[in-house]
Amino acid sequence: MPNFPALASHCVLLARFELYRLIGSPRGWFALGAFAVIWYFLLRYPIFEASVQLQQPDIQGMLGRVFGMVGLYNLLNWPVAELSVYWLITVLLLPLVAVLTSADQTAGDRSRGTLRFLTLRTSRTAIVLGRFAGQMLVQALLVLLSLLATLALAWWRLGSLPLAAVEHALIVWLNLLIVLAPFTAMMALCSALVRSSKLAISLAIVGSGVLVGLLSTLIWYQPDFLWLLQYLPGAQLPLLLGEQGWATFQHAGLPLAQTMVFLVLAWLVMKGKSL
């Protein structure tokens, strides 16, 4: 029987170490600096400029017709325009960022030989879950900082901030964590299969492309299998963009299930692979 208190304790320690690598090392501070610069330009130009344009009635009318045709009309009904633009950008951009930044969960340790050292003090289950939890903790912190900056931008433009904007910011934060979870878990699997983060990223990209290609070929000959596409990671994103508020959580089941499947596969690979 697994020792669940010890497992939880080891997972917490490994997750804290991932957070420490971000805020307690020169490399982490360099990454935070790059993050700040990137978000400065995103906030200053796409988000701020788009939010100003959204206040124009003719722009709202045009976007209302365009978004209405593709089921995204709710993007115009957010309490502040900055949040709607932030939501659109992050839902489409952050999954790719998660693939690139969470690729080195165990691959680097395997190539350096430290993974064998870690297994002398904790279980492989704790390593998989702890590293995944650490990556999610880091992403939760960075998403929260970017959201606070977006709210500050909206407050600066409006002179005040409606309470509904804070509620929607919380909804966006939770939804983005759910969106990022399957992609981070997928990289836990890819990282367990190879010995470097670059190979893990390549494996994720090539594997996803091959899977989509095989499914497309199958659907070409057997259209009845079109429903399989809705189970791919990220397939719920267009539906998510069409919702607003707490209704967005009705699409949380699929990414959470995908996360569990990827973590189980990563655990099986770690359990059966030599270090």
Image (tube, helix red, strand yellow):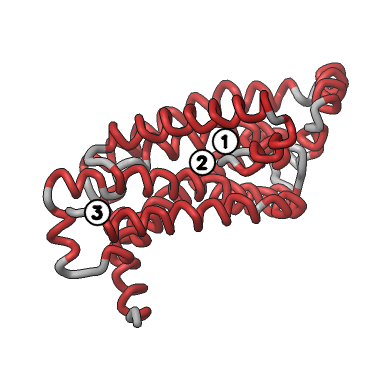
Query: How far apart in space, not on screen, are marks 2 and 3 (Cα)?
Result: 38 Å
Camera sees residue 158: no
Q: Are marks 2 and 3 in contact (CB under 8 Å)?
A: no
159 left or right, relative to 16: right
Q: Position of residue 18 (x, y in %)?
A: 30, 54
Q: For the image shown, how many numbered marks are present on the structure?
A: 3
Quadrant containing the N terminus is bottom left
Q: Residue at x 48, y 32 (%)?
A: 208
Q: Which residue is mark 1?
A: 90
Q: Position of residue 247 (x, y in %)?
A: 77, 52
Q: Residues within 10 Å of mark 3 (few under 14, many from 20)?
A: few
The tag earlier along the polypeptide, 1 or 3, is 1
- Label 1 element class: helix
Closest to the camera, between mark 2 and mark 3, is 3
When asked about the image quadrant of residue 194, the answer is: top left
Amino acid type shown at disc 1: Thr
Q: Which residue is mark 3?
A: 273
Q: Residue at x 67, y 25 (%)?
A: 221
Q: Position of residue 173 (x, y in %)?
A: 58, 50
The tag earlier along the polypeptide, 2 or 3, is 2
129 left or right, relative to 92: left
Q: Which residue is mark 2?
A: 146
Q: Residue at x 41, y 54 (%)?
A: 265
